[in-house]
């Protein structure tokens, strides 16, 4: 008989479940409880895809149920570092996307200059920081209803009818379909129900913010149920472009999902799902931040170049939120797909699950890659189309002393990209020194057409077994065998404004100068490899409410290929050896403790870890203008280590509080031939040259590369915290019983480097964000509240970037200013 669990995220057993209903486990905290009940109360119904390890009668109040190990368990019993957010938390805190979750989960880092260029890291590792290259794998897996999303760009949409989000930290390759070395984000949507239920939500706010969400679920027959959900979000941009009079970096999202559940008998569930999401904002632009001297001659740096063209930034204060970008901006993003999930309960102790899925992603960008109001780069467009197919099989077994998961996974992907980059009327003066070439304006209209495709295939078998050796002592080994193959094609054809081809070598002096900007290139890299990985976890229940664990994992991230071009040698020939990158080899150690006390009113969880990665896949740039998007290379070794300590408390009914902290020390242990930071680049290249002191001396020497061993990985704050509380009191308002509540949520991140090779100019200062909410939550399902986000209007950057040609120009992406609004939600 299939067991059904109901996660109550509203009012449970006549008592208010504290909000935010946010749980962080294994180095995070259990802020609020989720009660398990047998009745469907119109909240969130989760159908187990294996015989449940926890039955309703065995679960006390305030226990969070998770599915991180592909079975339903009490989170405090799971020896994995994990953070869990339920649907109400997501709604009330405004954490309606992956980018927003990081304000609640300190160990998660998400950086995005546009949807495609989104980096999702956990504990400082996951993907190379910088412009995205399709030829490598993600270190953090993103799953929605068991379906793997291969590119972060396909998962940056607003959450749609989400029941729960789990952020798993550490390698997950022996439990999940796609191998992930840094962690996984496991998103569970609300499923079809055989009782009629639904919800509607409307939000209005500053910057013309509008958001509508609706969902309805119910039976179509005795054996068929369906659920439909829609979501739409729009908001005026937060930066004003004086060139065209538009507010840019706006929000414009639309999503829809439909699911049909077939239940021919009590032992079989078959769910067919389809979803579609679209974004079409005028995005994503930057503002002028400042200037940092480089090794170029002073006449070739930003102040002199701008003065020569009578140009000045519209504002030198980035938080005036003014820009003058002159190229068209667009971040058109469409994604969707379909899946079929079948769950067969073979017996009381075993089940079989099959997930078949197809997904697509269409990306249509337009960018201003010179970050100024000058027509240096007049066009920068790299539209992409992706199709992916995946198939996963899992067998789950659960008994008194043994729990096991055995799985197989197959994945196939194709990505096609049609790049177009063009130099503008200001390009010759900006990039050239020959007066005759500047006069003839030889770069104006210089165009690079890039054609590229990637074919990727992956297959794996994996498994994990948990054995309770003696009462309280459990051993959990896991293993994975993986095969990956990648084939790529990259061709760049360069023409001048008359349409003449620029040759790959030789040619006139003008063509040589043009080739220094865009170099023709053809490469067809390929890669294939087998890998074996494994892990071992020991856990021991010291007492009923105290569990300690330790984990060792030896895993990998598969190799990759460069899909955006590679550097050229002194003769202008592509360095073919740079076309492929080696796999990462990962060793991970972790110890942790999960505790509950004060009659389960408080939790204190601790995790400490040490991870080393050999042949770390880094995103780098060698200073060539033609390799505009950077390329991938291997750093010899990196290391990340840290401690996560998290506390939550519910001292009395209606009052909750939490404090979660993460210390992360992520460094390049050895990277001796890294690209130099901008302040050490731009002059005459001399191999092995030492460049002391500040940059900017005319005619200075630059090393061909730099040793950045011991320096910080980009995008990683050493300290990160999230904290908050909520207090609620019973109130009868307009004849409805409920609770009046007030909540505060805050987050802090210390400074981090925003350049692959740490630069003195691109350290993003630490910042603190504070959000408030105040409202009334009624027993009949009505929730009405006002909110303020970034209440103290903190001024901070999400990223800082250097302009092309190493002129010293620094641009940035300011974070959201203070916003405010109100929400009305009704669950029925």
Image: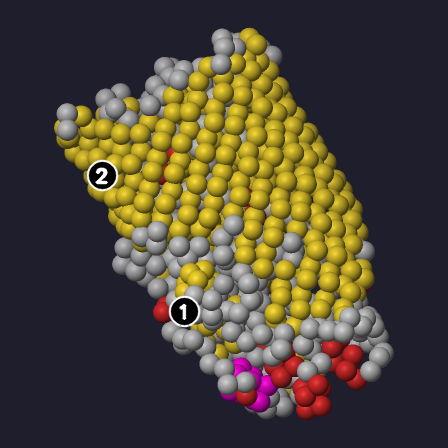
Q: Which residue is disc 2 drawn over?
A: 775
Q: Give the range drawn in magenta.
A: 298-307
Foreground mark, 1 or 2? 1
Residue count near mark 2 (Cα–Cα under 10 Å), binned few <14, some 14–19, many ≥20: many
Measured in 3D between alpha carbons, the distance from the residue under mark 1 to the one under mark 2, in whole angstroms, is 35 Å
Q: Residue at x 61, y 70 (%)?
A: 378
Report x, y in % for residue 604: 34, 40
Mark 2: which secondary structure?
strand
* Residue 776 against residue 520 in the figure, above or below: above
Q: Which mark is residue 308?
A: none
Instruction: Tell me if residue 370 comes above or below residue 526 in the rendering.
Output: below
- Residue 8 in the figure: left or right of residue 586: left
Residue 385 located left or right of residue 259: right
Residue at image coords 62%, 66%? 379
Q: Nearer the viewer, residue 673 or 642?
A: 673
* Vertical placement of residue 514 versus 175, above or below: below
Residue 671 lies in the magenta stretch: no
Q: Is the magenta stretch mostly helix, strand or loop?
A: helix
Query: Which element type, helix, strand or loop, lies under badge 1?
Result: strand
From the image, tell me which residue sits under label 1. Answer: 322
């Amino acid at each position: 008989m299939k067991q059904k669990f109901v996660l109550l995220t509203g009012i449970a057993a006549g008592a208010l479940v504290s909000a935010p209903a946010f749980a962080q486990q294994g180095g995070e905290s259990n802020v609020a409880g989720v009660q398990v009940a047998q009745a469907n109360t119109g909240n969130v119904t989760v159908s187990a895809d294996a015989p449940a390890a926890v039955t309703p009668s065995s679960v006390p109040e305030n226990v969070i149920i998770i599915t991180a190990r592909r079975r339903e368990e009490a989170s405090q019993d799971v020896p994995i570092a994990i953070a869990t957010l339920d649907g109400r938390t997501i709604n009330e805190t405004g954490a309606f996307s992956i980018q927003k979750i990081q304000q609640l989960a300190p160990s998660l880092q998400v950086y995005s200059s546009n949807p495609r260029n989104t980096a999702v890291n956990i504990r400082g590792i996951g993907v190379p920081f910088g412009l995205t290259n399709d030829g490598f794998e993600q270190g953090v897996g993103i799953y929605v209803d068991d379906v793997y999303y291969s590119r972060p760009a396909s998962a940056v949409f607003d959450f749609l009818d989400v029941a729960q989000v789990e952020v798993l930290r550490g390698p997950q390759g022996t439990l999940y379909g796609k191998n992930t070395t840094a962690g996984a984000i496991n998103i569970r949507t609300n499923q079809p129900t055989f009782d009629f239920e639904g919800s509607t939500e409307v939000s209005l706010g500053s910057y013309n913010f509008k958001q509508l969400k609706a969902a309805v679920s119910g039976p179509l027959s005795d054996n068929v149920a369906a659920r439909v959900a829609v979501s739409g979000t729009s908001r005026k941009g937060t930066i004003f472009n004086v060139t065209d009079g538009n507010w840019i970096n706006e929000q414009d999202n639309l999503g829809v999902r439909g699911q049909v559940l077939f239940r021919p008998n009590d032992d079989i569930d078959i769910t067919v799902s389809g979803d579609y999401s679209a974004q079409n904002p005028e995005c994503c632009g930057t503002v002028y931040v400042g200037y940092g001297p480089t090794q170029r001659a002073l006449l070739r740096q930003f102040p002199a170049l701008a003065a020569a063209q009578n140009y000045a930034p519209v504002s030198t204060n980035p938080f005036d939120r003014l820009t003058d970008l002159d190229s068209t901006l667009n971040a058109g993003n469409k994604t969707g797909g379909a899946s079929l999930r079948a769950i067969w309960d073979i017996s009381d102790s075993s089940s079989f699950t099959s997930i078949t899925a197809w997904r697509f992603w269409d990306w249509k960008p337009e960018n201003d890659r010179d970050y100024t109001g000058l027509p240096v780069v007049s066009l920068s467009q790299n539209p992409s189309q992706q199709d992916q197919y995946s198939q996963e099989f899992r067998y789950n077994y659960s008994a008194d002393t043994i729990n096991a998961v055995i799985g197989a996974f197959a994945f196939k992907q194709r990505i096609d990209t049609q790049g177009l980059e063009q130099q503008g009327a200001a390009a010759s003066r900006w990039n050239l020194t020959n007066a005759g070439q500047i006069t003839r304006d030889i770069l104006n209209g210089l165009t690079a057409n890039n054609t590229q495709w990637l074919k990727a295939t992956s297959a794996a078998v994996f498994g994990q077994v948990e054995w309770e050796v003696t009462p309280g002592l459990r051993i959990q080994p896991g293993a994975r065998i993986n095969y990956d193959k990648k084939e790529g094609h990259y061709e760049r054809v360069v023409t001048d404004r008359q349409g003449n081809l620029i040759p790959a070598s030789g040619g006139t002096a003008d063509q040589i100068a043009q080739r220094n900007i865009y170099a023709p290139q053809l490469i067809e890299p390929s890669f294939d490899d087998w890998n074996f990985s494994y892990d071992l976890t020991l856990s021991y229940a010291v007492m009923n409410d105290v569990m300690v664990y330790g984990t060792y994992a030896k895993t990998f991230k598969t190799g990759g290929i460069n899909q955006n071009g590679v550097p050229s040698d002194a003769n202008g020939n592509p360095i073919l050896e740079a076309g492929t990158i080696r796999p990462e080899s990962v060793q991970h150690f972790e110890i942790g403790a999960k505790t509950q006390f004060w009659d389960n009113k408080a939790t204190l969880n601790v995790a400490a870890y040490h991870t080393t990665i050999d042949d770390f896949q880094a995103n780098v740039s060698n200073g060539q203008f033609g390799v505009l998007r950077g390329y991938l290379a291997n750093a010899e070794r990196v290391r990340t280590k840290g401690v996560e300590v998290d506390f939550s408390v519910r001292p009395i009914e209606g009052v909750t509080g939490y404090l979660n902290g993460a210390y992360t020390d992520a460094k390049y242990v050895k990277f001796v031939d890294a690209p130099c930071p901008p302040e050490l680049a731009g002059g005459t290249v001399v191999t092995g040259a030492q460049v002391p002191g500040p940059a900017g001396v005319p005619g200075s020497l630059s090393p061909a590369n730099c040793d950045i061993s011991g320096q910080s990985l980009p995008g990683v704050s050493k300290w990160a915290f999230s904290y908050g509380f909520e207090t609620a009191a019973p109130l009868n308002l307009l004849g409805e019983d409920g609770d009046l509540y007030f909540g505060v949520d805050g987050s802090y991140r210390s400074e981090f480097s925003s350049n692959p090779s740490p630069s003195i100019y691109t350290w993003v200062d630490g910042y603190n964000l504070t959000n408030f909410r105040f409202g009334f939550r009624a027993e009949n399902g009505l929730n009405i509240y006002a909110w303020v986000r970034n209440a103290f209007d903190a001024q901070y950057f999400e990223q800082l970037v250097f302009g092309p040609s190493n002129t010293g120009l620094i641009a940035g992406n300011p974070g959201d200013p203070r916003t405010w609004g109100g929400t009305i939600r009704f669950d029925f």
